[in-house]
Image: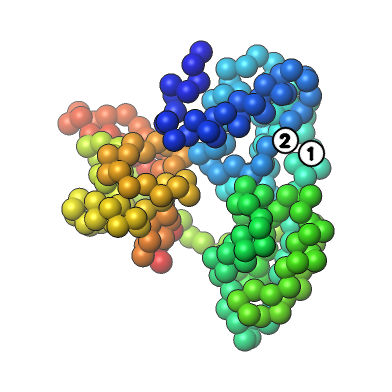
Amino acid sequence: MDIYQHFRPEEHEQIDYLLDKVRQAETQYAPVLTHFLDPRGQYMLQVIVGSFNDLHVAFDGGRDAERCRAVIAPSYYEPTREDFELTLIEIDYPAKFVTLQHQHVLGTLMSLGIEREQVGDIMVAERIQFVLTKQLESYIMLELTRIKGATIKLNVIPFEDMIQSEEYWETHEATVSATRLDVVLKEMIRKSRTIAKTHIQRKRVKVNHTLIEAADFQLEAGDLLSIQGFGRAKITEIGNRTKKDKLRITYQTLFK
């Protein structure tokens, strides 16, 4: 079975990484841990693992997490929370004097040299928390002392105390002529196809955190879109065609 034929050319590097992890689990017949995967990466890994006998995959990034680490393991092995090597950190900051948002936390983490793959979900509500790979816990506790000019304090807390972001994803159903980026984007932002293309050409649209400049880019279930000026959207399902040869899709939006 040629795994690559099921995925996009730009995803082949990710496939290489995931295949290597799966083959490690098969060869060693022991659990293997990945970095954090977005929903698309999780789907890709499930497809790959499905082509191997006697292996299964489990995901964890905290309660209802979008970004998760995966444990690929022989069928006999049932992973525990400890196997995922996660840490949950809460930020103590002067909320009366500074407003912190998701991008401020993520941007500061990136400025410390931490790769995106090492960071899980960032939850912003009355409190702010983020999930990180366990191996970076000591480093981040030492180095992360300020965000947006404000002095902060970090506390490692149990996952039982993990909060949920005050985010309200709206679910939509629609029919589209194709899964091209410009066609679906037009539907999501409720604008003309010309305006949708302009957003793409002006480098305002990312798919799965990658800048996409091709209007005919083919979207798939699990894709996460970041649309500058609007917010985020994700394709949750691509269904069957209607009698008029339109595709039924379900998507969610988290717009400003």
Spot occupied by residue 137 in the image (x, y as percentages of width and height):
79, 56
Q: Amino acid at mark 1?
A: Asp
The part of the image, by quadrant, that contains residue 223 is top left
| Helix, strand or loop for disc 1 | helix
Q: Is 46 left, or right, of 143 in this rendering?
A: left
The quadrant the C terminus occupies is: bottom left
At label 1, counting other C-alpha atoms closer than 10 Å, the crowd grade (few under 14, some 14-19, many 20 or more) is: some
Q: Amino acid at mark 2?
A: Leu
Q: Is 183 left, or right, of 24 in this rendering?
A: left
Q: Is 72 left, or right, of 216 in this rendering?
A: right
Spot occupied by residue 35 in the image (x, y as percentages of width and height):
66, 42
Are the two marked residues, 1 and 2, in contact with CB atoms closer than 8 angstroms? yes
Residue that label 1 marks: 83
Tag on residue 33? 2
Q: Is 226 left, or right, of 94 in this rendering?
A: left
Spot occupied by residue 176 in the image (x, y as percentages of width and height):
25, 40
Residue at the (72%, 35%) spot, across then down: 33
